[in-house]
Image: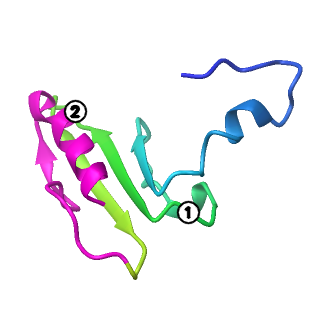
Amino acid sequence: LMPTKDSDIQQIHKKRHVGNDHVQIIYCNDHKEYRPKTITSQFNDAHVVVYPLRNGQYRIQVHRKDFMPMFGPLQDGMVIGEQLLGALVRETALNA
């Protein structure tokens, strides 16, 4: 987590680091679906979104731009346990 500076209304120091990657990994505590256009950039080709579930597992949502081929091992809609989460998210991001 990056600290928030009260003196910087737009939080520019945070924004310069977000959106310049081809793959975004998003952990979403909200019950609303993540929208890929939340972070706009000429990059952001793929988003791997992780939603914690009440049963201790995690639902995965994968967004990719039309020109990108399928990648994995995680696929949209999968539900996985905590023990596999970190390794599979990293491997999916590397394969994107």
Q: Please name the residue that numbered disc 1 is placed on.
A: 43
Q: Nearer the viewer, residue 35 or 1?
A: 1
Residue 4: image tag: none
x, y (%) of residue 33?
42, 55
User: Does 45 sit above or below residue 65?
Assistant: above
Residue 19 visible to the viewer? yes
x, y (%) of residue 61?
30, 56
Q: Which of 32 and 21 is in front in this view?
A: 21
Looking at the image, is mark 2 or mark 1 nearer the viewer?
A: 1
Identify the residue at horizontal 17%, vertical 43% (top origin).
88
Residue 11 visible to the viewer? no
Where does the N terminus fall, quadrant-wise? top right
Kind of residue indicated by mark 1: Phe
**Left or right side of 56 for 25:** right
User: Does 87 sit above or below residue 38?
Assistant: above
User: Does 38 sit above or below residue 56?
Assistant: below
The verdict on residue 71 being magenta is yes
Mark-to-mark CA distance, 2 and 1: 23 Å
Residue 86: image tag: 2
x, y (%) of residue 9?
86, 31
